[in-house]
Image: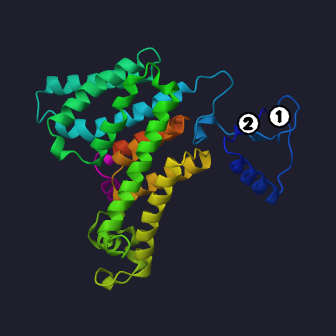
Amino acid sequence: MCATAIFFHNPHDLRLFKMLLSAIELPCCKNCNGEWAMSMQGLTIPKLPDILMPVPVVKSGEDVGKYIRLALMTAMLSVCFERIPGEFKPDNFHWFFSTAVLLGAVVTLAGTLSEKYSRIAVAAFCVVFLYDVAIAWSGQANHGWLAVWTIPIAIFFTKWWQQPLYADYLRITLGVVMLGAAAQKLLAGTYLDGSYIAYLSYFGTTTENMFRILCSEDTLNNPCGWHIFLGTFIVIWQIAVGLLLLAGVKSLIFLTVEVGFLLGAGLYADEMNFQVLNIALLCIAFRVGMSYSLFAVCGALLLIDMHGIGEFVNYVL
């Protein structure tokens, strides 16, 4: 059975991975051509189904651009899920107009995956999206403004998925956003003293109540150590991620951990739209694209998020 080669762009990641394998004493193996699996640039491991890989497994000669286009389509999909159900539902407009908007969104998203029509599809999406933002700019949340500053930039490049400049722009923008979010939490002070986590534990949604069991009932008056730790960790994590992104770190281990953190944050806050947008943009910034398995996870979470993850949990339990 043939094996899959995993390549490390950062030599430090390769050294860590080799140390891990030596610690658990895995046997050596040979690849399909009879060459030893270990090399200076890559390490061959037993093949997993491609659908289970967190990042795309790009075969020799395969176009990685389709995975990057899938990532941008996912970012656009998160914007659609945020706006279409609430703003263009039949209760607000004639059913024909609502249906036309839905069909237009489907065609545009599908066109984004096409190498030939991707730029046109993104441009068409941005015309409608930016108009929608302009007529109600004062009511835009973080999700809307992040999309404004990231998605439309792609139309300035003929083949945006091949442009390192666009990827670097997204990386720097996300780094600044992370540091800005951390600065906001530092100025408020409610994360560092644990009071915000304590408040959510008792008055938040179902998923935000998950940390209530860590502390006693007088937590609201005197936040416990666990809530202080969680609030402080969130701030430190955002600062670290922001600095690493600005420094140009493109480790796949870093990307995988951050994607996991964003998914966890979305589940906790019962708000997946914003996190899916961040994940999709990170996949483009790292120039690896989004795997089909990660797209399936994001798509499922967007569907659940329409009614709230807390509602879904209450229904299941």
Q: Position of residue 142 (x, y in %)?
A: 29, 48
Please say if 36 is above or below 69: below
Q: Position of residue 197 (x, y in %)?
A: 35, 70
Q: Position of residue 3 (x, y in %)?
A: 76, 35
Is 309 one of the magenta-colored residues?
yes
The segment highlighted magenta reads 305-316
SS for callout 1: loop
**Residue sitting at x 49%, y 38%:** 285
Please say if 101 is above or below 219: above
**Mark 2 belongs to which amino acid?**
Ala
Q: Position of residue 106 (x, y in %)?
A: 33, 25
**Mark 1 belongs to which amino acid?**
Asn
In this rendering, the count of numbered labels is: 2
Residue annotated with mark 1: 31
Dots 2 and 1: beta carbons under 8 Å?
Answer: yes
Q: Earlier in the sequence, mark 2 or mark 1?
A: 2
**Residue sitting at x 61%, y 46%:** 251
